[in-house]
């Protein structure tokens, strides 16, 4: 029997960052310093932690991190004005609005205000549409991370049956589209899906993206399947029950240390790419 593979996200993330270092140096040689602006509205402790982690990851690679912290009383209009200001700032290459925002703010309207060329987190409907059509520059970072892991470990999706459990607009739906574009046959499941265990059992590739701890059980997994767990729940627990799924799977991502670290590295990759694109546009118009 083939040896099982634990898909180590820390190794993949390091590989991505190492590749970015040369590109960042090239850009700096042309007086372009990649810059990611992160907007945090309110005082949610988890969101503050995520924003800090993203900022620290930027700084380690010498990417500028512009942190904007707005009060919990910020209105939708004030947030839109801030996003417009960042859209118009040529020194900012990527904009990340930390989710969730306070309930009184129209979050979708705020996401849609982000310029497509700066939507490095893949949150706009235009970005999603381009991803689905196969020419998006910046897919949502977690779906992009899942494909990056598959590429690093040479796991081919073509002709395989992929079952995605979850249909959120920044995870389940875009990862389904990305896998479809890689010639997988994709089944997207959700809370209304009937006979879920039987459907998962047919999968060559399982993407767990449902937001429920230990939801996917080992007895649901086909012998030799690939399990990509994009869940991250309290207590460092994924959406797939790791030990029982490990028994059946050929390859599996751990939680933590699987998809998570690669997600952050994709945000950095997209920001550096956006900086390069902005330089190309500037040089064309000289």
Image (cartoon, helix red, strand yellow):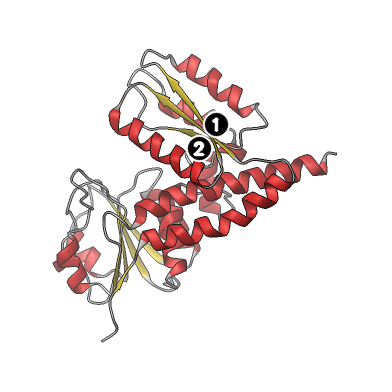
From the top left corner, tell me how far across and down residue 60 is, in percent: 49, 45
For the point 81% across and 44% down, the residue is 284
Q: Residue at x 32, y 53 (%)?
A: 230
Tell me: 151 left or right of 50: right
Query: Image quadrant for the C terminus?
Result: top right
- Label 1: which secondary element: loop
How far across and down, in percent of the image, does residue 79 sit?
48, 19
Q: CA distance from mark 1 to mark 2?
A: 7 Å
Q: Tags 1 and 2 in contact by the CB under 8 Å rule? A: yes
Residue 238, position as x, y percentages in the image: 23, 53
- Of callouts 1 and 2, which one flags the residue occurring earlier in the amino acid sequence? 1
The image shows a total of numbered marks equal to: 2
Camera-nearest label, 1 or 2: 1
Viewer-closest of 22 and 177? 22
Give the residue at the far bottom of this rendering. Answer: 1
Mark number for residue 114?
1
At which x and y percent is residue 147?
44, 61
Considering every residue shown, the one lying at the far right of the view is: 286
Q: Which residue is drawn at the image coordinates 31% and 56% (left, top)?
A: 257
Q: Residues within 10 Å of mark 2 (few under 14, many from 20)?
A: many
In the image, 104 versus 190, the foreground residue is: 104
Q: Name the image quarter holding residue 10.
A: bottom left
Identity of the residue drawn at 49% across and 15% down: 78
Residue that carries the numbered disc 2 in the rendered image: 124
Helix, strand, or loop for circle 2?
Answer: loop
Q: Relative to residue 203, is residue 242 drawn left or right?
A: left
Q: Is residue 246 above or below residue 84?
A: below
Q: Nearer the viewer, residue 58 or 238?
A: 58
């Amino acid at each position: 029997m083939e040896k099982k593979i634990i898909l180590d996200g820390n190794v993949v993330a390091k590989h991505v960052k190492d590749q970015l270092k040369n590109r960042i140096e090239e850009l700096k040689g042309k007086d372009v310093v990649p810059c990611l602006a992160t907007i945090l509205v309110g005082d949610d402790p988890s969101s503050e932690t995520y924003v800090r982690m993203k900022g620290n990851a930027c700084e380690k690679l010498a990417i500028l991190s512009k942190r904007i912290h707005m009060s919990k009383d910020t209105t939708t209009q004030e947030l839109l004005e801030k996003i417009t200001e960042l859209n118009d700032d040529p020194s900012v290459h990527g904009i990340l609005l930390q989710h969730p925002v306070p309930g009184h703010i129209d979050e979708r309207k705020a996401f849609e205000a982000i310029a497509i060329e700066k939507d490095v987190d893949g949150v706009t409907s235009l970005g999603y549409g381009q991803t689905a059509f196969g020419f998006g520059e910046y897919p949502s970072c977690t779906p992009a991370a899942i494909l990056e892991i598959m590429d690093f470990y040479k796991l081919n999706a073509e002709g395989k049956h992929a079952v995605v459990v979850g249909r959120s607009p920044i995870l389940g739906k875009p990862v389904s589209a990305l896998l479809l574009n890689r010639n997988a046959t994709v089944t997207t499941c959700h809370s209304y899906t009937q006979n879920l265990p039987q459907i998962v059992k047919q999968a060559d590739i399982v993407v767990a993206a449902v937001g429920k701890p230990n939801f996917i059980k080992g007895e649901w997994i086909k012998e030799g399947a690939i399990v990509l767990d994009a869940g991250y729940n309290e207590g460092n627990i994924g959406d797939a029950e790791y030990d029982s799924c490990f028994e059946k799977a050929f390859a599996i991502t751990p939680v933590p240390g699987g998809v998570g670290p690669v997600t952050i590295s994709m945000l950095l990759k997209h920001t550096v790419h956006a900086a390069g694109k902005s330089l190309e546009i500037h040089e064309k118009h000289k």
